[in-house]
Each structure stands twice: as C-alpha cells, then as structure tokens.
Amino acid sequence: MTAVLIAALGLLGLALLADLVLGVRHAWARPLPYLLGAAAATLLTIVGAAGLAGQPIRLSLDAFLGFGAADLTVDRLSALFLVISFSVAVPVSLACAAWALRPHRVRARGLGCAYALTFASIAVIVTADHVFVFLFAWETLTVAFYLMTAHQRGCTATPAIVTIALGKVSGAALLVGLLLLAAQSSSFSFPSFAALPHTGVRDAAYALLVLGFAVKIGLVPVHVWMPRGYRAAPGPLRAVMAGVAVNVGFYGLWRTLALLHQPPPWLAVVVLLLGGATALLGIAHATVQTDLAEVVAYSSVENAGLITVGYAVAMIGAAASMPPLIAVGLLAATLQTIAHALAKSLLFTATAGIEDATGTTELDDLRGVGHRLRFSGTGLAIGALTLAGLPLTAGFVSEWFLLEALMQQFRLGALGYTLPLAVTGALVALTAGFAAVAFVRIVGLTVLGPRGPRDAELARDTGPLGKLALAVLGVGCVAVAAVAPLQVRVIAAGLGPIVPREATGSAIKGPWVLQPVFPGFSILSPSWLAVVLPALLAGAGLLCLVFARGRMFAVRRVPAWRSATGGVEGENQYKPFAFTNPTRKVLANVLLTRAELRTVERRSGGRDDDPRPDAAGAHLGYTSDVVEAVEQFLYRPLLRPLRAAVRTAKRLQNGRLDAYVGYLLIAFVAVLALVLILA
C-alpha cells in the first residue's frame, strides 16, 4: 500500500504541473488537474481502507528537506480521516472537472495548483508523524486556501486577506504548542508526546493546539474567515474547502486527544460552551442570510459547533476517566463529521451548478429553481434535509447520537461538568430547531417554490460529470444512514488509538440496532427506519388513492387572499426574506437585528388609483438587517492598533542587509533561550 500512497502523491504532483504547464488555453486541459485529483483521491481512499483493516503503511521521509527522521504513517485514526476526506473528494473532483469544462469558468492558471496543493496537504497532514512535516503541510494548506479565495480577480481582496491572516494565527498557535511539547519530550516525533507527564506546560500546549485547530474548523470567535472565504472561492472549489479540507482540523483535535489523553478540566468546559455557542450563532446567521452560498457557509459554522460539542463531551470523559463517555462523545462527533462532509460537499456542488446556470445565488431570484435544474435542485434539497437532521439521512443519526451524548450528564457528579453540559444541551436543541427553519426555507421556497422571474433565463444544468457527482453525494447522504451499524463498526476501528474498540463497539446493541454506548438508555435502528418509513408512506398514499374515489388529484381553485399563499403572483408572493423575519425578531439579541420603517412616497396615498389620496395612506418602506457581533465588537476595535503596529513594522524594512541579519540573530537567540528554559 505504500506504493499506492506514493502513486497518489505523484498524481497530485502531475495535477499541479498540468495547471502550470498547460494553463487554460486549451479546453481539454482545463479539467485535467481535477481528473488527476479524482484518481489520486480514489487511491488515497483505498489507502485509508487498507489502514482501517490493520495493514501497516509507512513512507519514509528521512533527510527529506532537512526534517531528519520522519515518516508518513497510516494508523487507524489516520486511515479513518483519509476515508472520510477523500471518499467525498472523488465526486467533488468530478464536479470541479465538469465546471472547468464550461467556457470562461477558469480564466487563469493557479486554481488547479491550489486544488492539487490542498489535496496533497491533506494527505500529508493526516499521515505525518513529525512536527515540522506536519507544520510544513499545514502552512501549505493555508497558502492553497489563499490562492482559491483570491483567484477571482473581480472580487474584493478582503476575504483572501482574512483567510490567510487567521490561517497564520492557526499556524502560529500550532507551532508554539508543538514546540512546547517537543521541548518537554526532547523529540519532534508525535508518538513521543504520549509519554509526557501532566504539567502546566503540557496543559498550555494542549490549549494552543486546540486553538490552532479551532481556527481551521471555524469555532467562535475565530470563525469570521469561513463565510467570507467560502463565498469568495469559485464554483465547486467551495466544496473542496468546506467538505474535504476542513476535516484536517477535526483530525488535529482527535489526534491531540490521542496523544495527550487527559485534558485540563477547564479547557474541556470552555470548548464545550464555545461549541454550543458556535452552533447557535452559525445557524442563526444561516437562517437570515439572503444569499444561498452564504447560507451554506454559515451552516458550516453551525456544523463545526455541533462536532466540537461531541468532541468536548469526549474531553470531559477523558478528564473524568470515563472511557464510555469518551466513546459516545467521539462517536457522535465522528458521525457528525461524516454527515457534514457529505452534505456540505453536496450543497456547495449543487450551489455551484445553480449559480453557473442562473448567474446568481440570491434566494429571492431562485424561487422554484428545482423545477428547471432537476439534478442541482434535488442535490440542494437532499443536502438541506441532511443538515436539518431529518430521518433517513446521515444528519438524523449523528444529531441523535449527539443529543444522547449530552444526556449522559447525570453520570458525572461534579457540578462543574453537569451544568455546562445542561446549558450546551439547550443550545444544541435550539440549534436543531432553527436548522429546521433554515433548511425548510431552502427546500420549500428555493427548490419547490413557485417559479421565480428568472426562470426564462435559466441555462442547462451541470454536465454529465457534475450530475454523477451530485448523484453519488446524494445517495451517500441517505445510504450511510441506512447502514449506520456498519458505519459505527468502521468508526470504532478508526478510534482505536483514542478509546478501546470495545467501548465504542458497545454502541451496537444488535445487528441493526444502535444505542448510545451506555446499555439500557435508549435505542435506535436507522436501518429499519429506512424500510418502515417509505413503506408507511406508500401505504398511506395507496389508502388515499383507494378511498378518494378519483378526487385525490382534484384541484380546487378559489380567489387567493392577498397574503403569502401560493396563488398570489408578483411582488406579493411570500419570499425567503419574509420567511426569516420571525427569526430576526426572536434572535434579535444574538443577531443584533436592525429594522427601519421609512416613508417612501406620500402623494398617491395608499393606492395608485385612490380617488382621495392623503398622507395617512402613504407608501412605507421596511428594511431589516443583522450584524455579525463578533466582527463588530471584537475585530473592528482591533483594526486601529493593528494598523499602528503595521506602520511601526514598516520602519524596520529599511533595505539594509545587516539589519535583517541582526533581526534573524535576535529571533534565533530568543527561540533558543525559550527552548533551553522549557527543557
């Protein structure tokens, strides 16, 4: 399997060269990097499957780039994340190839390079066992993100700058945290960190590593790059960032728990509460956004919060030395990670197809888009239902496990654990409710709603490769739920380096029945639901058909009241913006909702044909907006001191070589002194 790993990395190298050498002048060359990437992703999925089966895979990097003794090693945890990331990367790559085939979609070199660098960085991050190999790949991924978000020349550079700035914060936190551990263990090898004693330095390193990975997954308050960055990336490349690359952040959290084991209790509680707040804030903004791409981007913030909540439950289990609690927390978080990877890839792929056909992602302009773009509309609906957590989808199984994990609070006697778990459970329940509102709007108004004014302008749906990608991802969202017990067995094998396989495997009560690890608490059979619910639906439809006596499909037409009913035409129709107005009111304190009522026109009175116009019947205009509170009150006040620091730093760039050598000497002495003190 080592040869397969080398072949996959070689194909990604060819994809990078294909973009650099062939460019975009030839139509046949534009999809080539993505097709090579699809082949590489297939090979990496095979490598991951072999690793889960217990086959040892190791690629030596001794003396490569001066790193010293280093390997790319695939253990069971690495193998699990290789399968999660690259199994969805295959259809996403096919969608990218279909998108690149269309004229004027890829206008310059660099996008294929960024795509190939992203995949290669993911593979190296997940398999690296050396500090500097890991950090090198992490920084490469940050550069790839920058290239993707800055590729569209016509848009503002702010999203790319925010993305790379917070990416550097992530890299700096990981660098300091890993160097602290290396100084304590006298080794740059990850396995050596597992034997470190529980000290204050180790706890500080634990917190820094969690911070570094939290930036990548979009945890509050370092989530602001995610909606901007995803929105700025072109076409299906958003799916590469959101459905594939973001998994390295979750892998880092899982690997940190595997290496350092027991976290400081305060850190577990902080991560738990931040996860709940992130989930609620993300879904609140997703519910009120008027742009489809931004809805999906903010839902990524919500999903990151839900996954982090499950991970925090596992951290609390580790702090309290309760392996079953570790197992149920990690199982819920991993199931949520898989659902997020599938649904987010599907949603961004469908969004790219809709935007490509219509030229817009504004929800008010996309009403009823599913009537004309059948594949993209269906993919959008399935992805939305999955993230809403409805039965028969992967999202239902993962959210059930997450809620069950939070309900185990009574097993912990300490109030410092039980109270945060109860508060987070309430936040997750609120999140689930508002998620239904957010995605009902997408399905009911955008996909299945009345046809909008732009229907006549709709072009053809995505090409054959894009349709294949949508079909694979859509089936995956439903199929993994139907075979959830098999999925749990695979996850139990992958989590072996963190928690005993027997503990996670106890979630399987019977061949097709699941329980939240602790026996006798509750049970669920997603597999039987996949059989029973369609059968009940078919039976109910048959009874209606038999007893309706031909009236089942009759339509009663009456004059529509001037309201939000489906019979209303024109500007009086119920629109996505109006649908979310109750949410803006209910969550006004979270969203900082601003509303304004103003007089638009007085002369004509209440109606254009009013025979007696007066000011009392003036036309009024209503506007409502929301505020990103973290950006408004945390980051904007930092801009002025940051600019002052930049102006000061500019004075250091005087062009003198001896000054730069002096700076390097000062930095080297400072780092050396820090290492000696910590050692």
Image (cartoon, rainbow, N blue to C red):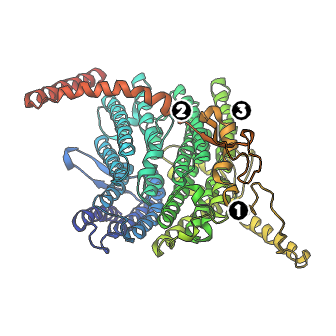
Q: Residue at x 51, y 35 (%)?
A: 220
Residue carrying label 3:
410
Of pointers 2 and 3, the one earlier in the residue sequence: 3
Marks 3 and 1, how far apart at CA: 54 Å
Q: Nearer the viewer, residue 287 or 42?
A: 287
The local crowd at label 3, few if under 14, some if 14 to 19, many if 20 or more residues have their Cα within 10 Å, is: few
- x%, y% of residue 466? 47, 70
Question: Is residue 201 rendered to the left or right of residue 291?
Answer: left
Q: Quadrant of residue 276?
A: top right
- x%, y% of residue 492? 56, 52
Residue kind at label 3, given as amino acid type = Phe
Residue kind at label 2, given as amino acid type = Ala
Question: Is residue 288 rendered to the left or right of residue 6?
Answer: right
Q: Residue at x 41, y 53 (%)?
A: 233
Placement of 327 over or under 74, stated as above or below:
above
Assign a secondary structure to mark 2. Answer: helix
Which numbered disc covers residue 629? 2
The local crowd at label 1, few if under 14, some if 14 to 19, many if 20 or more residues have their Cα within 10 Å, is: some
Image quadrant where one finds the N terminus: bottom left
Assign a secondary structure to mark 3. Answer: helix
- x%, y% of residue 27? 31, 74
Question: Is residue 530 rendered to the left or right of residue 273?
Answer: right
Image quadrant where one finds the C terminus: top left
The local crowd at label 2, few if under 14, some if 14 to 19, many if 20 or more residues have their Cα within 10 Å, is: some
How many marks the image carries: the answer is: 3
- Which mark's residue is nearer the viewer, 3 or 1? 1
Placement of 540 over or under 284, stated as above or below:
below
Q: Nearer the viewer, residue 533 or 54?
A: 533
